[in-house]
Amino acid sequence: MTASKGDTAMTATRRDHLRFALHYLEMVVSMLVGMFALDPLWPDSLTGHDAPGTLVMATNMSIGMAVWMTIRRHPWPRTLEMVAAMYAPFVVLLVPYFLGGIDGHALMMGGHVLMFVTMFAAMWWRRGDYYHHGHH
């Protein structure tokens, strides 16, 4: 029995979605590696406070993700877009934090939750790049 054109196209679409999901998962894992590996390098005077601590964490995660994207030979514009997507939620949430509308816990948790959304949005916006970017 041979596969029809529709079956082949569906298989290719599933493969593309799987490749996209794998890229997303790789970025999340590389962020976590960066967060844990680089945190000890920063002084407690920065990491022990809410606002600078969130920016240090975003930096650590961005470095880990950027290193992995470089290893995977993603173009620099995609890497810079992803770094911006990772910082944006924290920067936006610093406004209500400094105005007293949210506390440090909400800043940290909200930034992380929104970061996963903004990363996905950046990837979806350039989904052709992530669907078709081969693993090297």
Image (cartoon, rainbow, N blue to C red):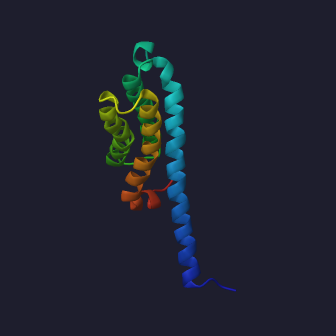
Q: Quadrant of residue 79?
A: top left
Residue 52 image offset from top left, x and y in percent: 37, 23
Residue 126 shows in the view: no
In the picture, measured across the screen, residue 1 lies left or right of residue 45, that is right
Q: Quadrant of residue 18?
A: bottom right
Q: Identify which residue is drawn at 44% across, 39% down.
A: 110
Residue 104 image offset from top left, x and y in percent: 43, 27
Observer-nearest of 94 and 67: 94
Q: Identify which residue is drawn at 37% across, 40% down.
A: 89
- Image quarter where the N terminus lies is bottom right
In the picture, measured across the screen, residue 95 lies left or right of residue 43, that is left
Residue 27 image offset from top left, x and y in percent: 49, 44
Q: Identify which residue is drawn at 53% across, 27% down.
A: 36
Q: Identify which residue is drawn at 55% across, 83% down.
A: 5
Residue 115 shows in the view: yes
Q: Is residue 59 above or below residue 133?
A: above
Q: Is residue 60 above or below residue 70?
A: above
Residue furthest front in the image: 101
Q: Quadrant of residue 106?
A: top left
How many numbered dots are placed on residues in this image? 0
Observer-nearest of 40 and 52: 52
Residue 8 image offset from top left, x and y in percent: 57, 77
